[in-house]
Image (cartoon, rainbow, N blue to C red):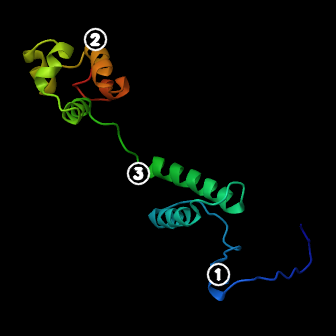
Amino acid sequence: MWFPGQTVWIKFVGTHREYDAVDVMNPIHPIRNDEDHARALAEIERLWGAPEGSAEAEALEVLVTLVDAYETKHHRIDPPDPIEAILFRVEQQGLTRADLVPILGSRARVSEVLNRRRPLTLGMIRRLRRALGISADVLIGGDDEAAA
């Protein structure tokens, strides 16, 4: 209910500490620096698990959106290097370089690709994606010479 131009008295039932924690005069602000980011993360942690549909849940949703936008702009995580992604997945799956021979062609070809002397071909990228489950976007890479 809104009472424009009128003073409204609200009775608070709780302890002084609980009253001090009520922050009705502190609206959500843009995140402009790492200090604001840290404050927003602390507030997200405090609001986590708020009942759906509550004012706290709405504030949580707004804060998460702001933090995501800030992190995307200021703390971007670049995609992994294609060769590093292959080596990581090989290690993760307990495979060896020899296991890459059916995918890349020959032992010499595996060595050339992993030592960055030969770029990945479209066929290799397709086979690596199917065999190891590595995203084609990662295997294509950016400006790296090892990606074709």
Amino acid type, residue under disc 2 in the picture:
Gly
Q: What x and y, as percent, mark residue 83?
A: 21, 30
Asked if residue 100 is positioned above or below residue 41 in the image, the reply reads above
Q: What x and y, as percent, mark residue 75?
A: 41, 51
Residue 120, quarter of picture: top left
Q: Which residue is the site of mark 3?
A: 75
Q: Which residue is the site of mark 1?
A: 18
Amino acid type, residue under disc 1 in the picture:
Glu
Amino acid type, residue under disc 3 in the picture:
His
Q: Given this view, does label 1 or label 3 mark the residue nearer the observer?
A: 1
| 10 Å crowding of disc 1: few (<14), some (14-19), many (20+) | few
| 10 Å crowding of disc 2: few (<14), some (14-19), many (20+) | few
Quarter of the image where the C terminus is located: top left
Seen from the viewer's position, the closer of residues 101 and 123 is: 101
Asked if residue 104 is positioned above or below residue 37 in the image, the reply reads above
Q: What x and y, as percent, mark residue 51?
A: 67, 58
